[in-house]
Image (cartoon, helix red, strand yellow):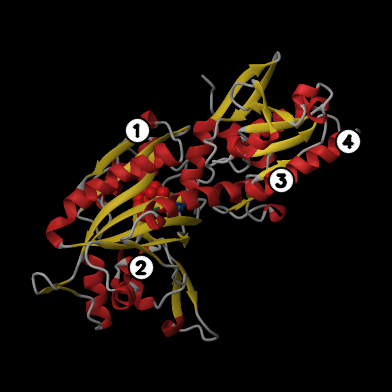
Amino acid sequence: MTDVTMEKIVSLCKRRGFIFQGSEIYGGLAGTWDYGPLGVTLKKNIEHLWWKRFVLDREDIYGVDAAILMNQDVWKASGHVGGFSDPLVEDVKTKKRFRADHLLEDAGIDPRGMTLADMDAAIKSKRLASPDGNALGDVRQFNMMFKTHVGATEDEASVSYLRPETAQGMFVNFKNVLDVFHPKLPFGLAQIGKVFRNEIAPRDFIFRVRELEQMEIEYFVKPGEWRSVFDAFQAEQKTFLAEDLGLPVEKIHQVEISAADRAHYSKHSVDTEFDFPFGQKELLGLAYRTDFDLGAHAKASGVDLSYYDEETKERFIPHCIEPTFGVGRLLLAVIASAYREDEQGGEVRTYLALAPRVAPIKAAVFPLLRNKPELVAKAREVYAMLKKQVPHIVWDDNGNIGKRYRRQDEIGTPACITIDFDTLGEKPELKDTVTVRDRDTGSQERISISDLVMRIRV
Ligand code: ATP
């Protein structure tokens, strides 16, 4: 078994161009990360698989892409201005701030279900100090929304927030979609987009960041029908992880959240947790938001957000089930569970056993030798032909074949295609065939150029 540490993953991500520190040349900005060429492709693959499963393949979910900046009244009505906060505690000497629940966890105390006062009492009775060894102040709430002003005037009326969830962009568009498309219940809206949370303590690489991407669905149902839809989405979340992303099922855990720990809008929540190298942590959420949001927006805006059921002749506010997925956490789970080390040809090698669907590069094409024009010409021809059909392939003629294999292994490329003298017809029976080397086993097979697209297409 490979010992997968975060150091190894962070190092591979940087070395191979998946993820870099945000604003690195200025010393970074805590809680921000930049995706490099391979990271962005992997991220888009995850997003595409999600969009395909939850939007394209269904008839009942409508995609939207709402603005990040919204009228501040949205966040008042949704409860975020008043309640979107984490418990904060300050080191009285250094003024550094920490999550109270995290300090308790680190001290072996389970903070689940604790109120603010409970946490404060626990920290005081156990005489917990800050990680720097100093005394801690009182535990208080810290609102995690980034506040800003829209336009040239900085007053109360111009206040806005960078959205801390994509969900509200869908609730405020509920009526638009209803009026234009006339969907019958149950139906949903889906969105992929950036959100911002001023996390007190960003940590664990891209696991807890201040700028992140979410993929969310707000699925509207008749009030009495929430349970079966909830259960179906819970199962579908697991299927997405295992079948689309190739995550190992034994590392996926679905955990019901107690009433004390649920978000303010939720009546029932199940988190999907994953065995990350730093422990079992939340990967996805699923919440029964009832009619909380539509009800609150209808009241605050004065706009009727009810639904008229033609069969029962009843008018009511639909209830909502919300499956939510963090793209960065998914990407981290994908890389961490694909990370492998083994020995090949007497050398240790590192590779990513990515499912071909998610792999950023599907195949690499090499001429056996870069200084033989006839090999290079033939390899270029094969590359151009494949690239038209499978865009995510690369050309590599740098260094010897062994080095090229190592490079591709580290980024999880499932197949390496080599054009050699037999391709040119040195052995006439092998003319127009190439070798295809498998990433995981290192074994090679000879196949005809005309079969290559079939072999590498995912
Ligand atoms: P946590 O308890 O870890 O802070 P949360 O319960 O606040 O997460 P939700 O509000 O349910 O998270 O957000 C939905 C999803 O968005 C999470 O399941 C996670 O995948 C992702 N997410 C939330 N906060 C962050 C963050 N700071 N960094 C990266 N991903 C995040």
Q: Give above or below for 161 relative to 373.
A: below
Q: Amino acid at mark 2?
A: Met
Identify the residue position indicated by label 4 in the image.
Answer: 374
Q: Nearer the viewer, residue 256 or 346?
A: 346
Local packing at callout 2 (Cα closer than 10 Å; few below 14, some 14-19, many 20+) is many
Question: How far separated are the C-alphas under marks 2 and 1?
Answer: 39 Å
Q: Earlier in the sequence, mark 2 or mark 1?
A: 1
For marks 3 and 1 on the same chain, the one whose residue lies earlier in the sequence: 1
Instruction: Confirm or reject: label 3 Cβ below 8 Å from ligand 1.
Output: no
The mark found on residue 3 in the picture is: none
**Would you say the residues marked 2 and 4 are in contact, meaning their CB atoms lie under 8 Å apart?**
no
Identity of the residue drawn at 74% across and 40% down: 382
Label 3, label 1: how far apart the Cα atoms are: 59 Å
At label 4, the amino acid type is Glu
Crowding near the residue tagged with mark 4, few <14, some 14–19, many ≥20 C-alpha atoms within 10 Å: some
Question: Disc 4 or 1, which lies upstream in sequence?
Answer: 1
| Residue carrying label 3 | 385
From the viewer's perspective, is the residue at label 2 or at label 3 nearer?
3
Residue 284, image x, y percentages:
37, 46
Indicate if the residue with disc 2 has its beta carbon within 8 Å of ligand 1.
no
> Looking at the rendered structure, which numbered label has been put on residue 108?
1
Please tell me whether residue 352 is drawn above or below residue 136 in the rendered image: above
Q: Secondary structure at mark 2?
A: helix
